Amino acid sequence: MRLRLDDYDRSVLNGEHGDGAKVAMRILTGFSDAIGAEHLLDISGAHVDGCLYHGQVSLDFVERLVAGGGRVRVPTTLNVGTLDLIHPELMLMAPEAQAAPRRLMKVHERLGCVPSFTCAPYQTLFRPVFGQQVAWGESNAIVFANSVIGARTNRYGDFIDLCCAMTGRAPAWGLHLDHNRLGQILFRLVDFPVSLEPSDSLYVAVGLLVGAKCADRIPVIHGLPAPRDEDQLKALGAAASSAGAVGLFHAVGISPEAPSLNSAFGGRAPETVIDLTPADIAGALRTLSTVPDGSPITAICLGTPHFSRAEWDRFLPMLRRIAPRRGIPIYVNTGRATLEGLEKDGLLDGLDGFDLVVVADTCTYVTAILRRFDGVVMTNSGKWAHYAPGNIGVQVAFGELEDCLASAATGLIVRGAR
Amino acid sequence: MSRVGTFHAVGAADAFALMLAEPLSFWGGVDVETGTIIDRSHPDLGKTITGRVLVMPSGRGSSSSASVLAEMIRRKIGPVGIVLARADPILTVACLVAQTLYGLHCPIVVCPIDGIGSGDRVQISSAPDGGALVDTSRSA
């Protein structure tokens, strides 16, 4: 074993902090050894992606930690679960099939986790700050924390994110360490007009192309227009981490660790340079839609990753203006804390007739909420479009937010709405 | 033939090898009810990993593979051992979880895998120094 443990680590492993912490430390040290880490480091936050029910083992693991008197040692948020606990009437699952997934979500609270149930913990009070060491699960959250905020996490996931939270430790390895965060592969946007508009589609397409082409190397993107808001960077990261194993990207002049091209690469030359042209962008967007324009649609799905307050503030006036009334449901996934804010401000009042369906705590592509799986769903999310056909078997069309609403109003996929 | 390797999850096994030419993602790649490879892009599509010593270059894909492998071990339809050319933290976590929760040992050994073929008998055992021994023999 190359891994060197300190006195605290050994005391946890010896059971001095209880059986739950001991179990977590045993798995964490096994993991750390497998990746070749030399020691562990302190973290000050965690985000646990353990609430999606993958089988009995999901529940047995958390219940074992609870039975061992376990508590998380650092503030820990929870990712989406299988159920919308705020709107149980939306779940189209037999009640008996909901029992174990519900228990899994609730039992995490007994470890002291915050019941945030969101894939966008960076939209909550628990958003980390630049340079903060954390252990996060959920691919979009990981890439957002590293790239947009400049916090530090590796790509954690099943079981191990919770082991880090229970011990307050993570392996000193990978993206936790300065020298592993420099860019390796350069993506240049070329042949675009000088006044390139920061459309949502552009960010999604760049994310998909970068994810598909960078493998496990750290991409640096040069030539992106300044984004309208951080939600466009959220969409880029979510697309990149759907199409590939991206945990960190740098966008020159935009993201915090890339004030210049030179600083993003730490003065070194890129290993590879890849040019992205308008034709590449168009091609990537085409692959996201499985049906031609003009096809009838049966639903709209927005908010993957969870809709931020800023996205709601753009969306709601658009919804009132376009006023779709064809009975095509418009599902919007969002965090329960964001929903609470909207309700407090009365922003969801007076929307009857538009068939707006607000979904919290989960996401429409991982569970049984959509009323129909046999039709075409339109989305403004590259991540939703990437995963939904495989996960829930729907046909999908990708489009700008405004085009999604215009399509809901006509019943057919339309583009170029203004 | 005898190889020396490193245990990433301890245990013993004696079973026939299933050698995969390409890394396999358990999440989306294996049917958790039947133990059959269902990834349509994988060259070993349709083969069953239940009861075999799985031999492959490395793991691949989503961290959800850890839950899928741990659940397969719990249901006793998983592999009985895994031999990898390169370490894989996700598969390691799965085997450590199954060991901790259920006392079920699916050892993971990292060692050179050249020359191991599907159907070879593979025996995984512990060396006196705590290292892993992987003995292989061609099946008759």
Image (tube, rainbow, N blue to C red):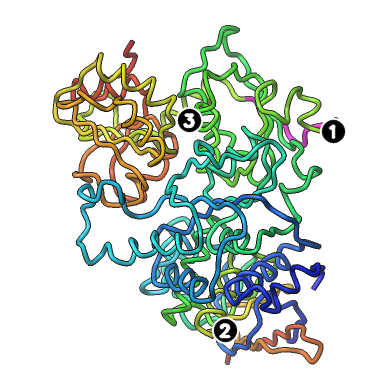
For the C terminus of chain B, the image quarter is bottom right
What amino acid type should be assigned to the residue bearing mark 3?
Answer: Ala
What amino acid type should be assigned to the residue bearing mark 2?
Answer: His
* Rendered location of residue A259, percent (x, y): 74, 23
What amino acid type should be assigned to the residue bearing mark 1?
Answer: Arg
Label pair 2/1, CB-CB below 8 angstroms? no
The chain to which mark 3 is attached is A
Q: Which residue is mark 3?
A: A284
In the displayed structure, A215 sits above or below A343; it is below
Q: Which residue is mark 2?
A: B105
Marks 2 and 3, Cα distance to the nearest angstrom?
A: 44 Å
Label pair 1/3, CB-CB below 8 angstroms? no
Q: Residue at x 55, y 20 (%)?
A: A227
* Rendered location of residue A111, percent (x, y): 50, 63
Marks 2 and 1, Cα distance to the nearest angstrom?
A: 45 Å
Residue B126 circle label: none
Q: Residue at x 27, y 20 (%)?
A: A319
The chain to which mark 1 is attached is A
In this rendering, do the residues under marks 2 and 1 share a single chain? Answer: no
The chain to which mark 2 is attached is B
In this rendering, do the residues under marks 1 and 3 share a single chain? Answer: yes
Marks 1 and 3, Cα distance to the nearest angstrom?
A: 30 Å
> Is disc 3 placed on a helix, strand or loop?
helix
* Rendered location of residue A262, percent (x, y): 81, 26
Q: Which residue is mark 1?
A: A268
* Rendered location of residue A235, percent (x, y): 49, 32
> Is disc 1 placed on a helix, strand or loop?
loop
For the N terminus of chain B, the image quarter is bottom right
Q: Which residues are magenta?
A: A269-275
In this rendering, do the residues under marks 2 and 3 share a single chain? Answer: no
Asked if the magenta segment contains residue A274, the reply would be yes
